[in-house]
Structures are given as C-alpha cells and as structure tokens.
Amino acid sequence: MLKKIQQIWKAKDIRNSILYVLALLIVFRIAAHIPIPGVDASSLRDIFSSNDVLGLLNLFSGGGMENFSIVMLGVGPYITASIIFQLLGMIVPSLEALQKEGEYGQQKINQYTRRLTVPLAAVQAYGFINLLDQRTSGALMAGMSSFQFFTAIVMVSAGTVFLMWLGELITEKKIGNGISLLIFAGIVASLPQSLANTLVAFDSSQVLNFIIFAIIALITIVVIVLITEGQRNIPVSYARHMVGQHSAGGVNTHLPLRVNQAGVIPIIFAISMILIPPTIAQFFLRSDVSWLANFSQKIIDLFQNQTFYGIVYFVVVIVFTYFYTSIIFHPEQIAENLQKQGGFIPGIRPGRHTADYLHMVMTRIILAGALFLGIVAVLPIVVGPLTGVRTMSLGGTSILIVVAVVIETVKQIDAQLVMRDYEGF
C-alpha cells in the first residue's frame, strides 16, 4: 500500500490530477455551507434528524439540504435527466441511433442531458423549498417575498448546474467518475458530525444497541465488498487457427459476469424517481380545485410514511437493477464477438445458443444482485428503529456508494500507473 502511494506521488501528472480533484471537492464542500439568503435554516435541524427519508437526501447533498445551501439539490436533477434520456433511448429511434454512434452520439446525448437538467433543477427546487417550508410550519420562509422566493429557486438551480460542471471537470482527469465522487464527498463529509452527535447522545443504557449497530455496520461493509467484487466466471476457449505462417488461439480463459453488474446506479436512479411524485404534488397544494389539493397533500404524506417509502424504494431498486443491467449487458453482442474471434463456451454452440446461455446465467445472477441492492437500500430505515441509533445516518446505501467509488477510483489510478509503465518501455 505504501509503495503504491509512493508510485502515485512520484508520477507528476497523476499527483497533479489528484490534487486538482481534491481542490474541486473542497470547492464543493465550501458551496455546501453557503446558505440561501432570507431563510431561517436553524428550523431544519430537528426535521432532518427525525425523518430518515430527508436524512438520506441530506446525506447525498453533503449536508447542503440541511444548511439550505445553494447546492442543496446536489446532482439529483442531473441524474434524473440522465435517467430520462436512457429511458427515451429505448423508445425514440433518433436517440437510439445516437447511442450507437459512439463518442459523437454520447456527446450529443450529454448535451441534451445538461439542457434538461436546468428545468428539472428549477422544478425540484420549487418542490423542496415548499416541502421544507411546510415541514417547518412556514417558519423557513417567514417574511420572504415572491421575488426572494424566485431568487432562491434560481440560486438553487444554478448550484446544481455548478456541481454538474465540477463533476465533468473531475471526470476529465480520469481519477474516478466526477458525479460519483461528489456524492462520495458529501457522504464522507457528514461522517464526523454523525460520530460527534452519536458520542453526545451516548447513554450507558444503550450500550447494547450501539454494539448491535456496530456489528450490523461491520457485517454490511464486509458483505458489500464481497458482492461488489463477486463475479461468475464463464469458461471460454479459443480454437487454434493459422495467421500466415504462425498459429494463434488455442487458449482457455473466462468471461467475468459480475453479481452487481449495475453498481450503485439503480439506487441513485430509484431515489431520483421516488422524488418525482411528491415534487410534482407540491405544485398543486395551493390549487383552487379542492380535490386536487387534497390529493396532492395525500401523495406528499404517503411518501413521507417510512413503511410505504421503504417498500416502494425496495421494489423500484430491484426494477431498476434489471432495467439498467439490460442496458449495459448485451449477450447477443458478446456472443457475436466471441464467434468472430473464434471463441466458444465449452458445451454451448456459438451464436444464438451462446447468447441464450449468457442471458440465462445473467438473469439468475441479477436476482441475487437486485435483492442485495434492495436490502442495502432499505437497511437504514430498518436499522434505525431496530437499534434506536438515529444519530448515525450512514446506512447501507451510503456504504455501498463509498465502497463502489473507492474501488472505481483505485482501479482508474492503477490503470494510469500501468499506462505509465508501458510508456516507459
């Protein structure tokens, strides 16, 4: 480990990239503590500590929502826009054609995603500001004029666009995914405060509860690491053939199929999608149509119910796991590439039979991965009431994101070190 750190520090370009990324993350943390003027953020403290759903959202924003900062939405609107275009790519022929055009098509889709992020950020800003104001019984925006309210929406929307820009700058340095690192920084930054709150609230009568909480947390970390790195190796053989006067092939290798093929994306997708109904309902709370206003209030109250939220969250995570895996895993394409390269799975005929076999194996693996992600997602909602430890909001979802981001970042840094070794030769 120490040798690896020394290699990274000696590589000037990698060292500069890491320092650059750290500087951008510090900028993000500073922005998370710049409050929107004209609001009383002190009234929000008790709300986020008593509501697990809002606590989780606050965790992903790095405390920005609790501070009512200019980046209170985090990168949520950008993620929602990405989901929308991935869904549209399956039903709109023009977008589907763009997805197949390689780097150019991806750049165009990214451009459309950025544009959609702006109105989505404005809508979510309006919904969350009204939601938080309602939870504080109007104390949050007491005495706030319509112009100040409009300014707050503009500032929050601009904060999301600013974070989107920071994420793209980080991604360009190839030291991990920028959006994931921003979420990671928000989670890690909230850990010291959670530990401090836990120590302050520590009571000798709750020693057993804290021990149970620590054991569950430790087991969760171990299981997440095992599942994240777990994979099913499909044996692949390459037939020997002649290339000019030399023979090639004749080797046995394997095709790795990861248990958690989708990573942490389904959980992030699920959170973004679950936020849509209560956000839209906020627009109709003050409607002159009584039944519409009452229905909107019921939708908001329903999604604030911990049991309902947990069940919907669990189901949506599983659905998105299957959906996202179907987007990134293409058994027909893999079977075609194997056949072109002279490779085959022992006992399975090349072509359609290989694609069907890979689809069957992947479907079975996804079930385990989807259930794992679903359990991890609802773990904070279950563990909090079970142990009575609510000051530690670092739940299974947060640990999964932290582990996944760390593994991805380390792999990208290792890849750059390997490239430097090749360049040396």
Image (cartoon, grey):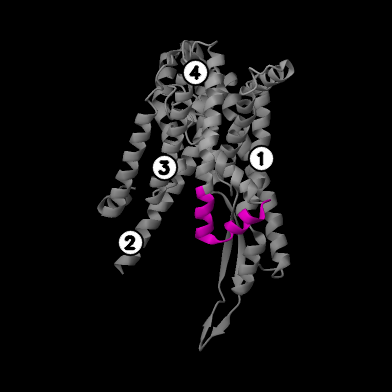
Residue range in magenta is: 91-111
Query: Mark 3 or mark 4, which has the lower sequence index?
Result: 4
Q: Residue 318 — which label?
A: 1
Q: Is residue 312 visible?
A: yes
Q: Residue 414 — which label?
A: none
Residue annotated with mark 4: 146
Q: Residue furthest bottom?
A: 245
Residue annotated with mark 2: 420
Q: Tell which of 327 and 151 is nearer to you.
A: 151
Q: CA distance from mark 3 to mark 2?
A: 28 Å
Q: CA distance from mark 4 to mark 2?
A: 57 Å
Disc 3 residue crowd, few under 14, some 14–19, many 20+, Cα 10 Å: some
Helix or strand or loop: what does disc 4 sit on? helix
Q: Residue 165 — which label?
A: 3
Kindly report which numbered mark, 4 or 1, lies closer to the viewer in this rendering. 4
Q: CA distance from mark 3 to mark 4?
A: 29 Å
Q: How many marks?
A: 4
Looking at the rendered structure, the kind of residue marked 3 is: Trp
Q: CA distance from mark 3 to mark 1?
A: 30 Å
Q: CA distance from mark 1 to mark 2?
A: 40 Å
